[in-house]
Image (spheres, helix red, strand yellow):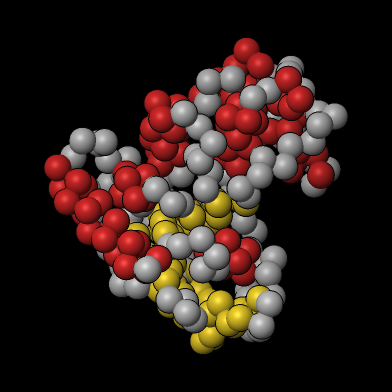
Amino acid sequence: MRTSQPLILRNARLTYADRVIFDGLDATFAVGRTTCLLGPSGVGKTTLLKALAGLADVGVPVEKRPVAWMAQDDLLCPWLDARANVTLGARLRGERPDDARAQALLERVGLGDRAAAKPETLSGGQRQRVALARTLYEEREIVLMDEPFSGLDAPTRWRLQDLAATLLAGRTVVLVTHDPREALRVGHDIRVLAGRPATLGPVLSPAGPPPRALDALDLLALESRLIAELAAAAA
């Protein structure tokens, strides 16, 4: 059953080293859509994502709901192989892991032949792909992703953007990225967090469902608009 409630944050406040990051911040993320967050480094994107997961104190109570979380770091357990890392959540919950589904996901991210490999034998990009497979394995209705494709080479990044957009269709996803093209390819809604204190800009919604073609002409125009907005925010 799909969740019928949007993700909502109201009147959130965050300070760091006596600096106000955001104050009175309101955010609503639509059900069944992928919202991509962009903005300058240090503006509070990751903290906003953590707040939605109930992992950060932003001064207001946040409804805690089951989520799948993909952090910037892969957070793989070094003593487990790739397949066991994919099924880690199930193991921690005392559930019987579905090794066949974990294997299928590893194959989808291009690591089917490395299922028995320990993290120390994998490259940074391969570790990130295991982390993505682990996130997809959870099958949560709410998925929070913090720069999930940042450590990948361009062709692999594009392929996994397509995969994530396809497998997460219909779920409520909030994805932080620094890449305007990525946001436009995989997001239903794109928002920029900027300012001091930070506020969320208006929603930009590209036409058509994700994943969108890399060379779509309408996306190129929107990318120029987003780059200009980000440049202004960083000035």
Q: Locate residue 111: give its quadrant.
A: top right
Left-right relation of 212 to 192: left
Q: Quadrant of residue 15?
A: bottom right
Percent of width and height locating residue 53: 63, 63
Residue with the most extreme front position: 235
User: Residue at (57%, 61%) from the top-left corner?
Assistant: 46
Q: Is residue 69 left or right of residue 181?
A: right
- Which quarter shows the C terminus? bottom left
Q: Residue furthest top?
A: 113
24 lies above or below 54: below
Rendered location of residue 6, percent (x, y) = 47, 69
- Is any part of residue 202 visible from this angle? yes
Residue 99, percent from left and from top: 70, 25
Residue at the location (60% across, 26% down)? 126
Q: Nearer the viewer, residue 230 or 105?
A: 230
Percent across and percent down for residue 222 are 21, 54
Residue 2 appears in view: no
Q: Which is more toward the observer, 8 or 41?
A: 41
* Number of numbered labels in the structure image: 0
Q: Residue at x 34, y 62 (%)?
A: 230
- Residue at the (51%, 24%) spot, across then down: 108
Closer to the camera, 198 or 98? 198
